[in-house]
Image (tube, rainbow, N blue to C red):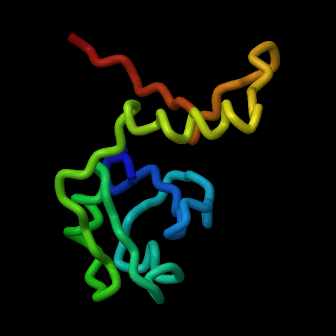
Amino acid sequence: MIDARRTEVFASIYDKDNNEVREIRADIVDQHTYADFLKDKILFFGDGAQKCKLIINNSNAHFLDGVFPCAKDMGVLGFEKFSSKDFEDVAYFEPYYLKDFVAGEKKKS
């Protein structure tokens, strides 16, 4: 979970076997944001988890302080992709942007 502006986070949801349950998206956090998933225990981590900790009050919500996803943690996943010959075609690869860029008005000096 990555902190975004205001009350937003970027988050995806995985099960205990690291299977994607819900793809990444921008969520506006309120007490009901993850209600469908909080029927079971959920671990929140990353810098966006602190924002959720202040808002979500549910006995199945567990917040892991000090756990922040890092590029160095992607090595095992990258090796698994490499071993299974799951490569991207870089000639046609496009980055995935969660939200469109919206420019603000220029500040007057």
In the rendered view, tell whether residue 59 sits above or below residue 92. below
Residue 85 lies, with reference to residue 12, above or below; the image says above
The residue at 68%/34% (across/down) is: 83
Q: Nearer the viewer, residue 13 or 57?
A: 13
Name the residue nearer the viewer: 18 or 27. Answer: 18
Quadrant assignment, res 42: bottom left
Q: Is residue 23 left or right of residue 3?
A: right
Which quadrant: the C terminus? top left
Can you give x and y, in whole percent of width and height, for residue 55 in the image? Answer: 26, 72
**Which residue shows up at 64% across the image and 27% down it?**
95
Q: Is residue 84 left or right of residue 25?
A: right
- Towards the viewer: 109 or 3: 3
Count of marks, rendered view: 0
Q: Residue at 39% across / 52% down in the picture?
A: 1
In the rendered image, residue 56, in percent from the top left (x then y), is placed at 29, 76
Q: From this viewpoint, which residue is outermost toward the front?
A: 83
Left or right of 88, for residue 70: left
Which residue is found at the position 39% from the left and 81% from the top? 41
Task: State whether residue 23 appears in this view.
Answer: yes
Question: Where's residue 72, x and y in %?
Answer: 38, 31
Q: Is residue 23 above or below residue 97?
A: below
- Work out whether residue 99 can be spotted: no
Name the side, left or right, on which 63 lies relative to 102.
left
